[in-house]
Image (cartoon, coloured by chain):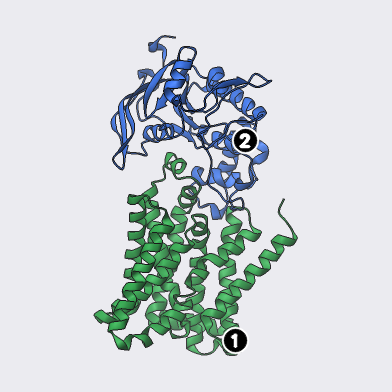
Chain colours: A blue, B green
Amino acid sequence: MTVSEHLHTLEIRNLTVRKGGVEILSGIDADLRCGEVTALVGPNGAGKTTLLLAILGQVPYTGKIRFCRAVEHGQGAPRIGYVPQRLPLDPDVPITVLDFFALSAQRRPVFLGASRRTREIARESLDRAGVAHLLQSPLGRLSGGELQRVLFALALRDAPDILLLDEPVSGVDIAGEEQFCDFLSKVQRDSRFSLLLVSHDLSVVTRHADQVICLNRRLVCSGATTEVLTPENLAAMYGTDAHLFRHSHADGHGHLHDDGGRRGSVQE
Amino acid sequence: METILSGVFALMDRLLPFAFAEPAFMKRALLALLLTAPAAAALGVPLVQHRMAFFSDAIGHSAFTGVALGVLLGVSPSWTMVAFGAIVAVAITLVKERTELSSDTVIGVFFSTVVALGIAIISREKGLTRNLQAFLYGDPLAVTDAELLWMAALFLLVSAYLAFLYNRILLLGIHEGFARTKGVRGPAVEISFALVVALVVTAAIHAVGILLVTALLVIPAAAARNVAWRAASAFWVSVGVAALSGFAGIVASWYLDTATGATVVLAAAACFAVTALYRVTRPRE
């Protein structure tokens, strides 16, 4: 696929984010291309979420983030969808999945009930994500996998040009994770948005990502998945101290183990 | 404004032909509670979701200093209390945002600072203590007509505010970054919410006092969580519990000869107990 075929790209040039005098990200250059899956890989504290927030315009930065849309697809700001890692909710928060849709889909305050249009939108979006049965479920009681699907359905509703997923498979079991990734690939192929996903999971990255950006406060490397994920690059990114190895589960899963991490990988 | 109130009082005489509702001060108290308690409870639902109970407590205690300042400056303490509460609310929100300290830390700092300031003022001005009593324990029976009209205006303001912004406030409480991708302007919504909470807290102080004002925001919302799992039902249960306990508290205080504000809060606590019992005996699936 040549560059001219892309409907749009996101160009990140010399992006630097400072917080309290410390450079969290320095001089990042990267491209996201439409219709491609780009994985953002790096140890904890590498600035992955910060990069997502910069793209969303939610942290101040220096450098350029430029969105280029192909002329035939109209002008205007890109629609960027975002699926956060998790929601800091009490299990008894009185908000159902339908309410959650209503909060962003309708003007009518949610205490006056969900509008008919909201119900249609919610049903349709949830159906597309394969979780139509969750419409009336309380938000705080969803499992990790169910919540990801709901958030994903909600993000897709706006037909985003770019979708940012922060650790989409954290807190999901292996079967659920595979299912979600396959589903993601399918939807992504159909809708041709560009997808940027933060992941700790090398099997997800190698199977589903076209491009990889390796980050550790600065750009360690980027490029096609197969070329980039070499032992040398991984060592450069995670440091030689990090207890890092690839191993295979019986079902062919490879996981990145990073003992300094707050999120342990799946243990056997 | 006199005529509006006398019209309302005449209507209350028809609707409530009971001994307790006869005196004008009881009618004022009833109106004050039916205006402030449901407004506080409606704000309480998102307040609890945002984990801001401590915030409303800090605003309540800032009223202590607001009143002292009013007496010191020779201005009506009812209004300095409102102004000071609003300033503290905005200050807490801004400092929290700029420093990125956790909100309970920032609130803790402000809480103690404003109370210390209040005590410092009172210790200089000996005659102040009697003035403060009414604000500490609340005295709905002493609500003036002007305060009553302010409460009515506030009731309308809160209704309009929530009709316009309720969805955005709840979304912000679910996940700020996500809410912002859905077009919610986080800081602006947060400041406006803090400000409206401050206005309602300072008004509700007339009804239940500084020490108990947080109860009006938190207890009905907590009771609602016991029985409701939809956003709409949680909202209406909270408002209903507040209105019910406001009414029941006033009536009970008349017959039991107890402090009105405290009796209202006890009535709300009874509602919480009943809903908690319901929740325990009929566990949600």
- Quarter-of-image position of residue A24: top left
Do pointers 2 and 1 mark residues of a single chain?
no
- Return the x and y of residue B140 as percentages of the image width and height: 47, 81
Give the vertical position of A163 relative to B90 (above or below): above
The three-letter code of the residue at mark 2 reads Gly
Mark 2 vs mark 1: in front: 2
Cα separation between marks 2 and 1: 58 Å
Q: Mark on residue A240?
A: none
Q: Chain of mark 2?
A: A
- Return the x and y of residue A151 as percentages of the image width and height: 55, 37
Give the vertical position of B218 relative to B210 (above or below): above
Instruction: Report the residue at 27% width, 79% height from top.
Output: B75
Q: Which residue is mark 1?
A: B17
Q: Chain of mark 1?
A: B
Q: Which residue is mark 2?
A: A145
- Return the x and y of residue B9 as percentages of the image width and height: 49, 83
Q: Secondary structure at mark 1?
A: loop
| Dot 1 crowding, Cα within 10 Å, few <14, some 14–19, many 20+ | few
Residue B21 in view of the camera: yes
- Return the x and y of residue B229 as percentages of the image width and height: 63, 53
Give the vertical position of A45 relative to B147 (above or below): above
- Quarter-of-image position of residue A61: top left
| Screen quadrant of the N terminus of chain A | top left
Q: Secondary structure at mark 2?
A: helix
Instruction: Report the residue at 36% width, 86% height from top.
Output: B129
- Side (left or right) of B215 relative to B278: left
Question: B130 and B166: which one is in front?
Answer: B130
